[in-house]
Structures are given as C-alpha cells and as structure tokens.
Image (tube, rainbow, N blue to C red):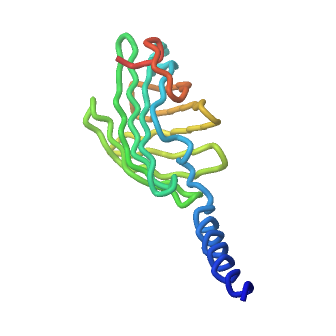
Amino acid sequence: MPHYSTVPLAVAALISLSAFQGHAAPAGPFAGMAGSWSGVGSITMSNGGQEQLRCRANYQVSGGGAQMQLGLRCASDSYNFNLVGDVESDGRAVSGSWSETTRNVSGTVSGRVNGDRIQVTARGGSFSAGLSLVTRGNRQSVAIQPQGSEVSEVSVTLAKGQSTTTGAAR
C-alpha cells in the first residue's frame, strides 16, 4: 500500500509546479520601475537658455508590469512642470494618456518598448514631444524633445529611492 500514498504527493508536486509556472510569465516593461525616483537634469529653452532641474518621479505599476500610472514633477529656478499619465504595454507597443497639470494640456501617448528602452510620442492639440526612457536597475534616464513649445529639450537622470534635497523637485 505504500505506492498509494505517493499519489497525493505526486499530485501536490504537479499542482505546485503548475502554479509556479503560471507565475513565471515574463514581467511587463514597467515592472522594475515601481516606486519613487529622484534626480537632477537640465532644461534647454528654445532661445538657447539652459537651467538645472530637480525632479521627482513616482510610478505605480500593476498588471505584472504591463500597466503604469506615472507622475514626473520637475522644477528649475524659473520653470516647472508636472506630467502625469496612464500607460499600458503588451511588451512591445505602449499606449495611453498624459496631462501636464501646470499648463492644463493633455493628450495621448504611443510608442514602443525595446529591451530597457521605452520610446514614445506624446501628442495633444498643437503640442507633440518625443520621450525616451531607459531604466537599468535603480538608475533611469529620461529625455524629452518637445515640438511647438518654449522648451527644446529636457534631460534628467533619476535614481530609485533617493530622497536628497538636491534631487527633489520642490
């Protein structure tokens, strides 16, 4: 009769293995981004002026890393912006919506994921911007190239979990 007692163990092992394999699905492109980030960068104006930025980002990730609510707030001595958005990805394409709350503009986001790089175009009214985001571990670089704006480029480097006063937008 000892062979009958091994059947429940084998079934339990198969169920455990099935459950483990069910959770082994590849993580979405936003999975490593969840949490708070902060850092510094620069903003270049259309007239050539440049200022240092202090930035904070917060990413709320769900759906196994396939969906994200984001907030990016940056400030310099004379300029600030507050970008929020909801995006989702199937692992290759990215789509969603965005708004910049200090200027009351909003629109759509669409683009692609390629490894650790996310490249999207944000459009709304007469405004468009290319946005490139590269995340490697606890470091992230964000580059924004607006069209039809007084800003010609924003470049920011963020670190996850930092809370220094030099890296935080006020």
Residue 66 visible to an observer of this rendering: yes
Query: Looking at the figure, which quarter contains the C terminus?
Result: top left
Q: Quadrant of residue 16?
A: bottom right
**x and y, in percent, of residue 64 in the image:** 51, 56
Is the residue 37 above or below the residue 108 in the image?
A: above
Residue 49 visible to an observer of this rendering: no
Please state the total of marks drawn on the protein image.
0
Residue at 62% x, 72% y is: 18
**x and y, in percent, of residue 143 in the image:** 54, 31
Is the residue 45 above or below the residue 91 in the image?
A: above
Q: Residue furthest right?
A: 3
Residue at 44% x, 23% y is: 55
Q: Residue furthest left?
A: 104
Observer-nearest residue: 123 or 54? 54
Observer-nearest residue: 43 or 150? 43
Q: Quadrant of residue 163?
A: top left
**Quick check: 124 left or right of 165?**
left
Query: Looking at the figure, which quarter contains the N terminus?
Result: bottom right
Is the residue 66 above or below the residue 72 in the image?
A: below
Residue at 66% x, 72% y is: 13
**Quick check: 17 left or right of 155?**
right
Residue at 59% x, 58% y is: 92
**Quick check: 101 left or right of 76?**
left
**x and y, in percent, of residue 132 in the image:** 56, 38
**x and y, in percent, of residue 41 in the image:** 52, 19
Observer-nearest residue: 68 or 111? 68
